[in-house]
Amino acid sequence: MKPRTRARSIALQVLYETDLANNHLPGDVLKTRLEETSLSDDLAEFTRGIIFGVLPLTKDLDQLIAKYAPEWPLDQIAAIDRNILRIALWEFAVSRETPVKVAINEAVELAKLFGSDSASRFVNGVLGALSDHQHEIHEIIKKRLAQEAKLES
């Protein structure tokens, strides 16, 4: 497994666990995963960036998935697939440090590793639909974050 794919897989495991077990704190889960799988400092920071980038935006990302990919109802998406979609969407539409094709390819790889037999095709289809709206999604998230920052100040 490529190093950044391994980092994403750890982020996925942390997000999945904290998604299903509300009492598991993401920092604690990440610490445990990093003890089990060693990553370089920069890859650990990359993993941390994904986790703590996705977590505060989970509801927003879910709403965007539901809006732009309505043929896949969110409540019917497996938890592992939902978290793979959140990571990829965050990477290409929020963080924007990962090119769309790379984020989609990485998500498909994670789906092959962790999802059901049809998960990779499903993830590819949903992310393809979302990528067509990446600029709109980025603007929606940017406005949301600006509103939050205004409320906090």
Image: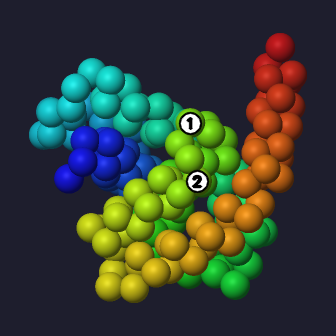
Disc 1 packing (10 Å; few <14; some 14–19; many ≥20): few
Q: For this view, does 136 lie left or right of residue 116? A: right
Q: For this view, does 72 lie left or right of residue 24? A: right
The answer to which of 2 and 76 lies nearer the viewer is 2
Residue 28 occupies which quadrant of the picture? Answer: top left
Q: Which mark is residue 97?
A: 1
Q: Position of residue 59 (x, y in %)?
A: 67, 53
- At a point 50% along the width and 53% down the height, the residue shown is 103
Amino acid type at circle 1 is Glu
Disc 2 packing (10 Å; few <14; some 14–19; many ≥20): many
Do the residues bearing badges 1 and 2 touch, measured as CB atoms within 8 Å?
no
Q: Position of residue 66 (x, y in %)?
A: 71, 70
Q: Is residue 70 above or below residue 94?
A: below
The answer to which of 83 and 39 lies nearer the viewer is 39
| Residue of label 2 | 100
Q: Residue furthest top?
A: 153
